[in-house]
Amino acid sequence: DAGVTQSPTHLIKTRGQHVTLRCSPISGHKSVSWYQQVLGQGPQFIFQYYEKEERGRGNFPDRFSARQFPNYSSELNVNALLLGDSALYLCASSLDGRSSEQFFGPGTRLTVL
Amino acid sequence: EDQVTQSPEALRLQEGESSSLNCSYTVSGLRGLFWYRQDPGKGPEFLFTLYSAGEEKEKERLKATLTKKESFLHITAPKPEDSATYLCARGIREKLTFGTGTRLTIIP
């Protein structure tokens, strides 16, 4: 059974550019969450979507946005990239996003130059 | 504010030397305490969920326990392949709040 998939694996951008990261959840899971992990830290919550609706938002600026599609896949968009946005971006899927476990994908490594 | 604190930050053990990792957290609204394993450059791998004080779960050489304010991950007779960063997280409504992890190194 396929796990959570993310694309691309690696990405290099320059300051001021825009980036779109993609995630496909485990089959049957309706909730997708996004996390940012900088080196040496634990993942930080960015967003959660359930049934295409935003259920939660972490302490990130409006440059970060996301959406969930009818097939439950999701995109994370980041505008006006800053050097500090360089991180591993993780997608996690779960059945309902609240009482059930979250399973993580391999992540997208974003480097902003 | 939600807080999860893990200790120690790093731990080096000889192969076969058992030890424990600690995760302490603020209590309000707890909806599960989660343990993950993370290898360098990869996404966290789910290990355990604990919901109630006194609960214990085991998987191979790992056993997780939960009290009202902390959780322990016990590693029995570890092998080099157990080397990784171990993350704990508490679930609050829709989000997981993570600690900074314990970097475990098992020396052959």
Image (tube, rainbow, N blue to C red):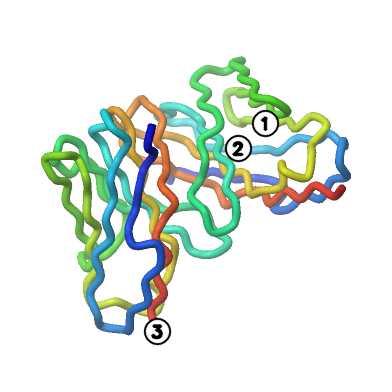
Q: Which residue is mark 1?
A: B72
Residue nearest the viewer, comparing A58 with A101:
A101
Number of numbered discs overlaid on the protein picture:
3
Task: Specify whether disc 3 shares its chain with disc 1.
Answer: no
Q: Amino acid at mark 1?
A: Phe
Q: Which mark is residue A113?
A: 3
- Residue A19: x and y, percent? 25, 70
Report in which chain the residue with disc 3 lies: A
| Mark 2: few/some/many CA within 10 Å (<14, 14-19, 20+) | many
From the image, state whether disc 3 or disc 2 is nearer to you. 3
The chain that hosts pointer 2 is B
> Disc 1: which chain?
B
Residue at 16 percent of width and 39 percent of height: A71
Q: CA distance from mark 1 to mark 2?
A: 9 Å
State the separation of the CA atoms marked 3 and 2.
Answer: 37 Å
| B44 lies left or right of A81 | right
Quadrant the N terminus of chain A occupies: top left
> What residue is rendered at 37% in x and 77% in y?
A12
Type of amino acid at the residue the image marks with label 2: Ser
Please name which of the two marks, 3 or 1, marks the residue nearer to the observer: 3
Instruction: Pick out the residue farthest to the front.
Output: A1
The residue under the point 62% across, 44% down is B86
| Residue kind at label 3, given as amino acid type | Leu
On screen, residue A91 versus residue A18, left or right, reads right
Disc sitting over residue B24 in the figure: 2
